[in-house]
Image (spheres, rainbow, N blue to C red):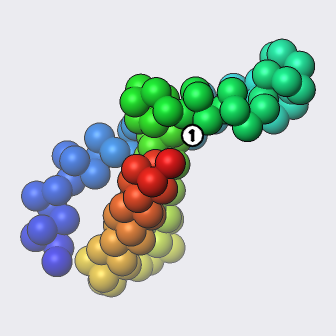
């Protein structure tokens, strides 16, 4: 398991960086804009308008990125917290498990976006 994770390390770092970018910059801005209602009126967030927006393929990719990428960033952070607290001997099992959870969440996000 450890050898496979070493081969996948560049891909994992790419997903980690993208997850931190989305989780650190994009999601807080989206929550401030949409969640706090700083843009538009109540009609701007009606079901029909939101469904028309998410029907766009680019918007679906953005929604997929907003759901899946932070999972990879979180999994990578938790793996390194585990290592920092002395879990180096079981890093292969814990890291593999965390990345499998992130993969499962990403697949669930793909299914959710594809079935909209």
Say which residue label 1 marks.
23
Q: Report whether residue 68 is seen.
A: no
The front one of 71 and 84 is 71
34 sits left or right of 67 in the view: right
Question: In this orientation, which residue lies closer to the viewer: 7 or 26?
Answer: 26
51 relative to 46 in the view: left or right: left
Residue 89 visible at all: yes
Residue 47 in the image: above or below residue 101: above
- Residue 48: % across, % down: 69, 32
Position of residue 16 measured from the top left corner of the image (x, y, whole percent): 39, 46
Q: Is residue 32 above or below residue 106?
A: above
Residue at 44% in and 63% down:
108
Q: Dot 1 lies on which element?
A: helix
Q: Camera-side residue: 71 or 48?
A: 48
Q: How many marks?
A: 1
Look at the picture and state if 31 lies above or below 86. Answer: above
Give x and y (percent) for residue 109.
45, 55
Residue for point 10% across, 58% down: 7
Which quadrant is the N terminus positioned in?
bottom left
The residue nearer to you, when weighing 43 against 37, is 43
Residue under the image location 44 percent in, 77 percent down: 86
Q: Residues within 10 Å of mark 1 (few under 14, many from 20)?
A: many
Quadrant in the picture for residue 49 = top right
Q: Position of residue 20 (x, y in %)?
A: 49, 40
Residue lying at the far top of the rendered structure = 40
Left/right placement of residue 28 relative to residue 20 reads: right
């Amino acid at each position: 398991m450890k050898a496979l994770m070493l081969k996948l390390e560049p891909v994992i770092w790419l997903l980690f960086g993208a997850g931190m970018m989305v989780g650190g910059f994009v999601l807080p801005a989206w929550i401030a804009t949409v969640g706090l209602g700083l843009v538009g009126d109540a009609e701007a967030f009606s079901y029909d308008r939101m469904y028309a927006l998410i029907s766009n393929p680019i918007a679906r990719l953005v929604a997929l990125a907003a759901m899946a990428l932070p999972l990879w960033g979180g999994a990578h952070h938790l793996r390194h917290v585990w290592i920092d607290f002395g879990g180096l001997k079981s890093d292969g099992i814990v890291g593999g498990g965390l990345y499998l959870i992130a993969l499962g969440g990403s697949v669930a996000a793909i299914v959710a976006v594809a079935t909209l």
